[in-house]
Image (cartoon, rainbow, N blue to C red):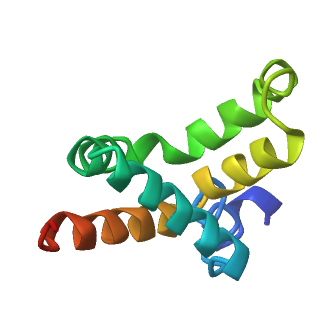
Amino acid sequence: MHLMAAPGFWSNAFAVDSREPLTADELRWLDAIAEQLVRRGLERPAILFLESSKPLQFVAGQAARFLDPIFSLVVPQSALERLADLLEKRQAAERLIEKLEIHEHAPRS
C-alpha cells in the first residue's frame, strides 16, 4: 500500500489549531492588551475585529513572522515573537474576547 493512501496519513495535514494551553505569561499579556483596549473605550470594535478575523488568525501569525525583519526595526524582536505565537493560538483570541466582554458588561464608574 502506498504511504499517502494509508489511513490517517492526511488527518492532520492541514491542521493549524494548536491545542496547547496558554502560558501564564501569555495570559498576563492578553490581560494587559484587554486593559489597554478598555482604557481607550475600544471593547466593541476589538470584539468585532477579533470575531470577524478568527478564520484568518493563523495566517496573521504567519504574516507577522514573515514581516518580522521589517517590524523589528521599531518593535522589539521578543514582542513580535510573542505576538506571532498568540496569533497562531485560537484560544488566545477567545480569551481576549471573554475579557473584553466582561469589561463591556461591567457597570461604568
Q: Quadrant of residue 25?
A: bottom right
Q: Residue at x 25, y 41 (%)?
A: 45
- On the question of residue 2 being in view, the answer is no
Number of numbered labels in the structure image: 0
Look at the picture and state if 70 lies above or below 33: above
Q: Residue at x 70, y 79 (%)?
A: 23
Locate residue 106 relative to residue 30 in the image: left or right: left
Q: Quadrant of the N terminus?
A: bottom right
Q: Quadrant of residue 40?
A: top left
Locate residue 71 relative to residue 31 in the image: left or right: right
Locate residue 13 relative to residue 99 in the image: left or right: right
**Residue 88, image x, y percentages:** 62, 54
Look at the picture and state if 75 lies above or below 12: above
**Residue 96, image x, y percentages:** 42, 63
Closer to us: 106 or 77: 106
**Residue 55, image x, y percentages:** 40, 46
List the single residue furthest toward the front.
109
Look at the picture and state if 47 lies above or below 53: below
Look at the picture and state if 16 lies above or below 22: above
Q: Residue at x 32, y 45 (%)?
A: 46
- On the question of residue 102 being in view, the answer is yes
Closer to us: 9 or 40: 40
Q: Quadrant of the C terminus?
A: bottom left
Q: Residue at x 74, y 54 (%)?
A: 82
Q: Quadrant of residue 107?
A: bottom left
**Residue 74, image x, y percentages:** 80, 23
